[in-house]
């Protein structure tokens, strides 16, 4: 027995609305905005850094892809046991993703693995060149002296550095100074 089921289809004419085309500017519209973030960053498969910030804005689709931290950044350099060995904090930061270059601005404070404290107003850190540099005033507090100057270049661990225009306060061993005068 064959059963025939009639199929009724209804069509109705729908009004097509006007479509307004907009152009989105990837340089001004972020691909991600995150509040109160803590994240881990790996390098060559190893977790190396911990970043904490109140605001992280990512512009991955921009002509120059950047990550912005307009309210400040706290970064810890982790050792192989994931314990902090150094830290950096600043008032604001920008990471230029394509160049692997960080620009830290305003009250930049660094504590390196030698327990030295480094203060400056602006700092650049090139992850691809493994180099830290600045043309700004720098203040370095070591266990036995204070070094200041304008402009510096350093390895990325901030343990070996050169200050371009140095000045400083250096302790003097008085007995050695007297012996040198005689």
Image: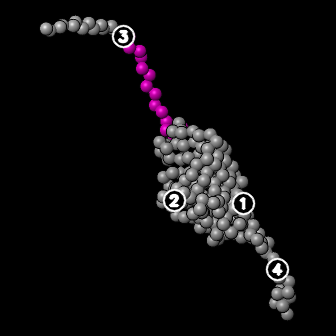
Give whichever of discs 2 and 1 has the lower sequence position.
2
Q: Which residue shows up at 63% across the image and 71% down it?
A: 160
Mark 1, residue position = 119
Above or below — where is 165 with respect to 41? below
Above or below — where is 71 with respect to 44? above
Give whichever of discs 4 and 1 has the lower sequence position.
1
SS at mark 3 in the image:
loop
Mark 2, residue position = 46
Give whichever of discs 3 and 1 has the lower sequence position.
3
Classify mark 2: residues with Cα within 10 Å, few (<14), some (14-19) or many (20+). few
| Residue 17 lies in the magenta-colored region | yes
Give x and y (percent) for residue 138: 71, 63
Give whichever of discs 2 and 4 has the lower sequence position.
2
Mark 3, residue position = 14
Give x and y (percent) for residue 129: 52, 64
Separation (CA) of disc 2 from disc 4: 44 Å
Separation (CA) of disc 4 from disc 3: 91 Å
| Residue 27 lies in the magenta-colored region | yes
SS at mark 1 in the image:
strand
Q: Is residue 9 left or right of residue 167?
A: left
Q: Which residues are magenta?
A: 14-28
Mark 4, residue position = 172
- The residue closer to the viewer here, 166 or 53, is 53
């Amino acid at each position: 027995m064959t059963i025939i089921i009639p199929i009724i289809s209804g069509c109705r004419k729908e009004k097509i609305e006007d479509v307004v085309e907009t152009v989105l500017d990837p340089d001004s519209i972020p691909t991600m905005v995150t509040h109160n973030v803590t994240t881990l960053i790996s390098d060559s498969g190893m977790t190396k850094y911990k970043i904490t910030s109140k605001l992280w804005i990512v512009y991955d689709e921009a002509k120059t892809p950047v990550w912005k931290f307009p309210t400040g950044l706290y970064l810890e350099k982790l050792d192989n046991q994931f314990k902090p060995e150094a830290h950096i904090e600043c008032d604001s930061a920008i990471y230029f993703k394509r160049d692997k270059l960080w620009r830290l601005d305003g009250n930049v404070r660094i504590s390196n693995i030698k327990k030295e404290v480094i203060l400056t107003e602006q700092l650049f850190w090139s992850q691809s060149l493994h180099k830290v540099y600045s043309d700004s005033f720098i203040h370095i507090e070591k266990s036995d002296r204070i070094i200041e100057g304008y402009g510096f270049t350093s390895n990325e661990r901030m343990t070996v550095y050169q200050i371009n225009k140095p000045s400083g306060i250096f302790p003097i061993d008085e007995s050695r100074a007297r012996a040198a005068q005689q």
